[in-house]
């Protein structure tokens, strides 16, 4: 049995502040796959970005995370409830859920046990939608610096599960009917240099590097970012390509 790996609790407030928002078109598409829109379960919700996006499409949204610290940063709304629960043991009733959403979290789960839980709670024809994103794109010069940080300085500091993100979840197989050819989506933002640094600081590999060396690896890249960014308060467009995979419970 794989135990819960909590890479984010110690920086939950920063995680909530700097993580990007998902596009509404993503939620529109996912909702369109569902025959009913009574209950959605957002699993591995983190600070709740995806759960909030689902609220306008489902009568009720239950959002869970194994991290108490992450759930502590959230606020329950009229038809959105946050709970502490692992992905593999949600506590939800059998055959009750129209949609399970997993935003940038499936790689942290014990996937076989989660798949069993998903089959248990999904209604017949219910949908499981999981998406991930890899490195951001800003400008060629900034992108090169981030790629060097990722490939060289942080090489060996990423959890093994990160490989699933790099592969766009291509090799994750679930005992459900996969929906082919899902559309491409992108997240977009406009960030200053300090906002970028704040976001990079939420990376689990940066956290591990700091813990091991008592030094922030981003310090070595600050001057290079200064040179290519321009004035620190100048906002630049930021894009994350999203990879969505979806399955239907054909039981």
Image (cartoon, rainbow, N blue to C red):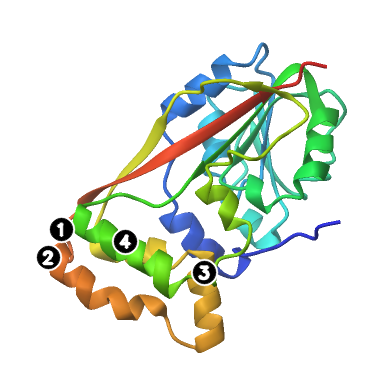
- Residue 226 sits in which quadrant? bottom left
Q: Mark 1 or mark 4, which has the lower sequence index?
A: 4
Q: Secondary structure at mark 1?
A: loop
Q: Nearer the viewer, residue 218 or 75?
A: 218
Task: Pick whichever of labels 4 and 2 is earlier in the sequence.
Answer: 4
Calculate the distance from the C-alpha at mark 1 to the C-alpha at mark 3. Answer: 27 Å
Answer above or below: position of 249 versus 185.
Answer: above
Report the residue marked by disc 3.
205
In terms of sequence position, does the residue under pointer 2 or pointer 3 come before the other?
3
Image location of residue 69, percent across then percent down: 65, 62
Dot label at residue 195: 4
> Which residue is at the front of the view, 141 or 114?
141
Residue drawn at (73%, 54%) of the image: 66
Q: Position of residue 189 (x, y in %)?
A: 31, 45
Q: Dots 1 and 2: beta carbons under 8 Å?
A: yes
Q: Is residue 196 left or right of residue 14?
A: left
Which residue lies under the disc numbered 1?
Answer: 234
């Amino acid at each position: 049995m794989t135990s819960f790996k909590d890479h984010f609790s110690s920086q939950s407030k920063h995680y909530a502040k700097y993580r990007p928002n998902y596009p509404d078109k993503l939620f529109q598409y996912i909702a369109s796959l569902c025959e009913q829109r009574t209950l959605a379960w957002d699993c591995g919700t983190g600070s709740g970005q995806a759960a909030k996006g689902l609220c306008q499409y489902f009568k009720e949204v239950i959002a869970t995370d194994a991290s108490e610290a992450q759930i502590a940063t959230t606020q329950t709304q009229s038809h959105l409830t946050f709970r502490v629960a692992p992905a593999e043991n949600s506590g939800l009733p059998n055959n009750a859920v129209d949609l399970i959403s997993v935003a940038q979290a499936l790689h942290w789960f014990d996937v076989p046990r989660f798949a069993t839980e998903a089959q248990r709670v999904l209604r017949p024809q219910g949908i499981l939608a999981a998406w991930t994103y890899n490195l951001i794109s800003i400008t060629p010069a900034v992108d090169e610096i981030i790629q060097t940080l990722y490939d060289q300085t942080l090489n060996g500091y990423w959890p093994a599960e990160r490989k699933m993100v790099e592969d766009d979840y291509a090799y994750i197989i679930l005992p459900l009917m996969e929906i082919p050819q899902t559309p491409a989506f992108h997240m977009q933002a406009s960030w200053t240099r300090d906002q970028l640094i704040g976001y990079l600081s939420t990376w689990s590999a940066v956290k591990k590097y700091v813990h091991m060396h008592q030094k922030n690896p981003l310090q070595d890249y600050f001057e290079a970012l200064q040179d290519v960014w321009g004035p620190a308060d100048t906002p630049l467009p930021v894009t994350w390509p999203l990879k969505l995979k979806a399955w239907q419970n054909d039981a």
